[in-house]
Amino acid sequence: MEELLGDNTKFKLVDNDPTITNEDQLIRLLSRLKKDNFITEAEYKVAKPSGSRLARLYGLPKLHKENCPLRPVMSAIKTVNYGLGKMLTSRLSHLRQSQYVIKDSSDFVTKLTNTKNVDKLMISFDVVSLFTNVPLTFTVDYILDQLYPNIRNLVLQV
């Protein structure tokens, strides 16, 4: 766990807790989005942070692996962006209605059972630290380009 936290390309040590500043900035942005009718009053109430705290990192042992390494888990409950994530999950849920989306392992087994491609090969990748290795800016830009291909130059200022 210390090795993960020691990777300064993923985490950095800060002198001051940015929670209050980040909370204030998000509240201002959400207020503007509500005023401009980008979000509803109900969405604003869900997304608006109050009494935020820093995320908590802990590890769960991988009992099936040698030396029981820890699987890092970051709890974001009550963080600045927690409500925003809940609101966006609700707002974007219609995008998950696709034959290509797999809900969980049971859904995967069901879809796999109904697959008729006996001449195909299935492979699986063991990805290490997927979350911390996904380039965040690229990922957000890609998703926005897919959702809004004709709105490339829209900029929201706080």
Image: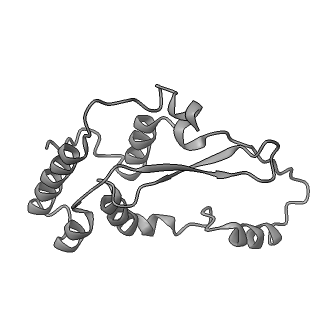
| Residue at image location 51% in from the left, 28% down from the top | 6
Callout count: 0
Asked if residue 57 is positioned above or below residue 51 in the image, the reply reads above
Position of the C terminus, as image quadrant, is top left
Q: Residue furthest left?
A: 35
| Residue at image location 52% in from the left, 69% down from the top | 97
Which of the 4 quarters of the picture holds residue 106? Answer: bottom right
Comparing 140 with 23, the one in front is 23
Side of 52 relative to 71 (left or right): left
Comparing 96 with 57, the one in front is 57
- In percent of width and height, residue 30 lies at 17, 57
Asked if residue 88 is positioned above or below residue 120 in the image, the reply reads below
| Residue at image location 27% in from the left, 56% down from the top | 52
Position of the N terminus, as image quadrant, is top right
Comparing 10 with 54, the one in front is 54
- In percent of width and height, residue 9 lies at 47, 26
